[in-house]
Image: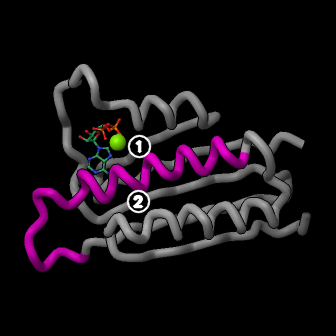
Amino acid sequence: MSERPSVLRVRCPAQSRFVASLRHALASFLRAHGFAGQQLDDVTTAAGEALANIVEHAYTAAAAEVDRYIGLRANVDAQGTLALEVYDGGAFVERRPMRDRGFGLRIIRAIAGRLTIDTSNGTRLRMIFEQKR
Ligand SMILES: Nc1ncnc2c1ncn2[C@@H]1O[C@H](COP(=O)(O)OP(=O)(O)O)[C@@H](O)[C@H]1O
Ligand SMILES: [Mg+2]
């Protein structure tokens, strides 16, 4: 592990056909930084839910000229702590809880050590994972 933080940044159109590639890019980056096994599965599962939410929800009310992108940023510091951000330029949709929906954020909360959701400018989920060695 290098002493410097190592960062993956990806940005692509908010279309479902890119979601798997983003997940795979994240998995490769994390593998190269010592993440493995169940923890690697957990992180990519959480990322997948956040990415799917952007495709499904972020731009539903957006005007035609809005840049519909998915942003992903993964930062691994010298201690092996991962700060993962999944963000968009859309608008967070507040919804009443529905009985058979709404598992994505719950799944993320159950997996990530910490989760913050900033909806001030698009939606930005920030998840922190301590690497299990
Ligand atoms: N990136 C996002 N942009 C806009 N709204 C979002 C975003 N992520 C989540 N949401 C809102 O949060 C709700 C809960 O998300 P989630 O738990 O994944 O449930 P689901 O996707 O099944 O509705 C979504 O229904 C949506 O209203
Ligand atoms: Mg969802």
Q: Which one is earlier in the sequence, the residue at label 1 or at label 2?
A: 2
Please, what secondary structure does the residue beneath circle 2 have? Answer: strand
Q: Give the residue number, with chain letter if any, for mark 1.
A: 117
Q: In the rendering, at what x and y percent does residue 9 appear?
A: 57, 73
Q: In the rendering, at what x and y percent does residue 46 appear?
A: 53, 44
Dominant SS type (magenta): helix
Q: Residue at 24% of width from left, 61% of height from top? A: 90
14 horizontally vs 105: left or right: left
Q: Which residues are magenta?
A: 40-67
User: Is the CB atom of the residue marked by disc 1 within 8 angstroms of ligand 1's nearest atom?
Assistant: yes
Rendered view: 93 above or below 97: below
Is residue 86 inside the magenta stretch?
no
Q: Which quadrant is the N terminus positioned in?
A: bottom right
Quote the CA–CA distance across marks 1 and 2. 10 Å
100 horizontally vs 47: left or right: left
Q: In the rendering, at what x and y percent does residue 124 appear?
A: 40, 53
Q: Give the residue number, with chain letter if any, for mark 2.
A: 87
Please, what secondary structure does the residue beneath circle 1 have? Answer: strand
Q: Residue at 27% of width from left, 25% of height from top? A: 100
Ligand 1 falls in which quarter?
Answer: top left
Q: Nearer the viewer, residue 21 or 106?
A: 21
Q: In the rendering, at what x and y percent does residue 49 appear?
A: 44, 46
